[in-house]
């Protein structure tokens, strides 16, 4: 149970974070963009859980709990914004969203 | 290599592969396919939490992420009902190449930092009596309700505000969303200026009566 090296856990977190970053920087569909943000937040949680396993502290789990709460709030507001934007502009491409007015 | 280490490799590879498949042009072009790959990735990460004896987070990951957030995503995707022409991702552009290169650079920097940090790191022995409650719902819950009381309450306020905000934003009867009244006259004039010029009758021609 305790023989997973810390470096491998952190590498998993780093790779997941980079995949999320690729998604945020290259994909133009706002729905896939929000999903990539979820992957990035998840990667940070992996890192936190790995560190707290190595120190035996529960504080990392509490912090990961708060990140999950923030991710849920972000998804709810972000998807509501997607719906509102789709009603006014009729598009989900962030390249076409240049104006704050209609 | 022990069984736990092997399972970690399987779950980690699964998480990385399904996140990558979420973004690749062939498998991730349709947002609903992306959402399904993301669910697979989140389940693999939940397995990694279980391997690291984070009991509460394993449950929360499945309940909150796979249960609530992903249902919201699939619901919105199906509500939007995008046609195949609307989900056609644009071709490779210089911005995308720069974005990919930047991500690779970040990954390289993170890897070197990890190699520096983790030298000689040894995990604590969970069989020791001091760590008997590590990661359990009881221990983390007790910490949430004592040391982290104020942040916990603030998180509940954040979720409440987010829920109300989402309802307000997605409501159909917002006046600027429906816009039953026509735009102001000045804007109409500006919008139809080419047609006015073609007609040859200026709108204020009655001014020549006297």
Image (tube, rainbow, N blue to C red):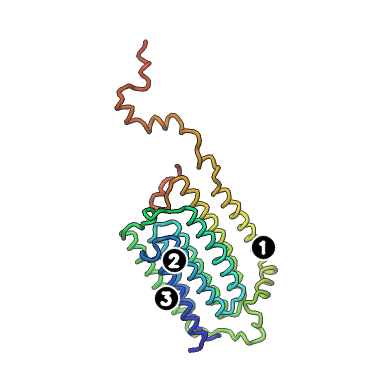
Which chain contains the residue that carries disc 3? Answer: B
Which of the two residues, A47 or B37, is positioned nearer the viewer here?
Answer: B37
**Residue B91 percent location from the top left of the image:** 31, 59
Query: Around disc 3, counting alpha carbons within 10 Å, would you say few (fewer than 14), some (14 to 19), or many (20 or more)?
Result: some
Q: Is residue A5 above or below residue B73?
A: below
**Viewport quadrant of the C terminus of chain B:** top left
Label 2 near label 3: C-beta < 8 Å?
Answer: no
Q: Is residue B100 left or right of residue A45?
A: left
Q: Is residue A1 left or right of residue B112?
A: right
Could you say which quadrant of the image residue B56 lies in?
bottom right
Secondary element under disc 1, as helix, strand or loop, is helix
What residue lies at 41% left-to-right and 69% top-to-bottom? B20
* Residue under label 2: A20
CA gap between label 2 and label 1 equals 31 Å
CA gap between label 3 and label 2 equals 16 Å
Which of the two residues, A62 or B82, is positioned nearer the viewer here?
Answer: B82
* Residue under label 3: B111
**Residue B17 percent location from the top left of the image:** 42, 73
Q: Is residue B209 above or below residue A68?
A: above
From this viewpoint, is residue A81 visible?
yes
What residue lies at 39% left-to-right and 29% top-to-bottom? B189
**Residue B129 percent location from the top left of the image:** 67, 86
CA gap between label 3 and label 1 equals 35 Å
* Residue under label 1: B150
Most extreme residue toward the bottom, as rendered?
Answer: B1
Q: Give the label, 2 or 1, closer to the camera.
A: 2
**Residue B62 percent location from the top left of the image:** 57, 69
């Amino acid at each position: 149970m305790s023989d997973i090296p810390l470096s491998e856990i952190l590498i998993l977190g780093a790779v997941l974070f980079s995949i999320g970053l690729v998604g945020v920087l290259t994909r133009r569909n706002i729905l896939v963009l929000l999903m990539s943000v979820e992957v990035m937040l998840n990667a940070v949680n992996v890192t936190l859980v790995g560190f707290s396993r190595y120190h035996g502290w529960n504080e990392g789990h509490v912090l990961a709990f708060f990140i999950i709460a923030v991710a849920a709030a972000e998804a709810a507001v972000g998807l509501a914004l997607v719906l509102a934007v789709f009603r006014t502009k009729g598009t989900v491409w962030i390249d076409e969203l240049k104006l704050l007015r209609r | 290599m022990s069984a736990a280490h092997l399972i970690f490799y399987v779950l980690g590879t699964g998480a990385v592969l399904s996140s990558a498949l979420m973004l690749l042009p062939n498998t991730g072009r349709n947002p609903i396919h992306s959402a399904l790959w993301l669910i697979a990735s989140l389940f693999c990460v939940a397995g990694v939490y279980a391997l690291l004896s984070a009991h509460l987070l394993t449950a929360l990951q499945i309940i909150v992420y796979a249960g609530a957030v992903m249902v919201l995503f699939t619901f919105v995707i199906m509500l939007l009902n995008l046609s195949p022409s609307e989900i056609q991702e644009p071709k490779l552009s210089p911005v995308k190449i720069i974005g990919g290169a930047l991500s690779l650079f970040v990954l390289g920097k993170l890897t070197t930092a990890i190699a520096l940090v983790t030298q000689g790191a040894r995990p604590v022995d969970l069989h020791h009596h001091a760590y008997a409650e590590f990661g359990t719902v009881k221990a983390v819950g007790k910490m949430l309700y004592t040391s982290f009381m104020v942040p916990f309450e603030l998180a509940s306020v954040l979720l409440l505000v987010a829920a109300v905000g989402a309802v307000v934003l997605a409501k159909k009867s917002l006046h600027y969303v429906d816009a039953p009244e026509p735009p102001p006259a000045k804007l109409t004039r500006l919008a139809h200026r080419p047609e006015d010029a073609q007609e040859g009758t200026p709108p204020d021609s009655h001014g020549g009566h006297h």
